[in-house]
C-alpha cells in the first residue's frame, strides 16, 4: 500500500457549483492510471469524509489518465457554516489515503 499522492501527479479539489465538490486525481501517465484506477475505492473515499457513497459520482477518464469524484457539499457554498468556500482543502485528505 502507498499514499495516493505518491502514486499520482496531482490530487486537486474544487467547487463544482454551489452544491457539489469535485476531486480530480491526475495520474500523469497510463501506467499510473492502470495502478490507481482499480485500487481507488469510491466507498473508501466516502468513508474519509464520513459520507454515504451512494451520493458520490465517479468518472474514470482513461484517455486523460484522470479520475474525478464528485460529492455533495456539506453546506451550500457561501453559507455561514461553509468552512471551505472554494473546496480546495478536500484534496489533502484524499491524497493521504492508503491504496
Image (tube, helix red, strand yellow):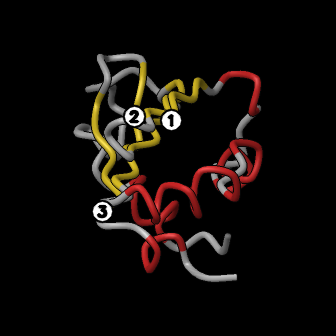
- Please identify the quarter of the rendering in which residue 1 is found: bottom right
Percent of width and height locating residue 97: 60, 69
Above or below, 46 against 92 in this view is: above
Going from N to C along the chain, the mark reached first, 1 or 3, is 3
Rounded to the nearest angstrom, the CA distance separating label 1 from label 2 is: 6 Å
Would you say 93 lies left or right of 15 here?
A: right
| Residue density around tag 1, few if under 14, some if 14–19, many if 20 or more, within 10 Å | some
Give me the residue at 66% from left, 74% from top: 98
- Quarter of the C terminus within the rendering: bottom right
Judging depth in this view, the residue of 26 and 73 nearest the camera is 26
Q: Secondary structure at mark 1?
A: strand
Q: Which residue is mark 2?
A: 22
Above or below, 75 against 10 in this view is: above
Q: Secondary structure at mark 3?
A: strand
Q: Which mark is residue 10?
A: 3
Above or below, 90 against 3 in this view is: above
Percent of width and height locating residue 79: 33, 25
Q: Are marks 1 and 2 in contact (CB under 8 Å)?
A: yes
Amino acid at each position: 500500500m502507498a499514499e495516493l499522492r505518491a502514486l499520482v501527479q496531482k490530487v486537486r479539489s474544487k467547487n463544482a457549483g454551489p452544491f457539489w465538490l469535485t476531486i480530480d486525481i491526475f495520474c500523469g501517465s497510463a501506467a499510473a492510471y492502470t495502478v490507481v484506477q482499480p485500487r481507488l475505492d469510491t466507498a473508501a473515499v466516502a468513508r474519509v469524509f464520513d459520507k454515504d457513497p451512494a451520493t458520490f459520482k465517479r468518472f474514470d477518464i482513461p484517455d486523460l489518465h484522470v479520475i474525478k469524484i464528485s460529492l455533495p457539499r456539506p453546506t451550500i457554498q457561501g453559507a455561514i457554516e461553509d468552512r471551505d468556500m472554494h473546496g480546495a482543502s478536500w484534496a489533502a485528505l484524499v491524497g493521504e489515503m492508503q491504496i
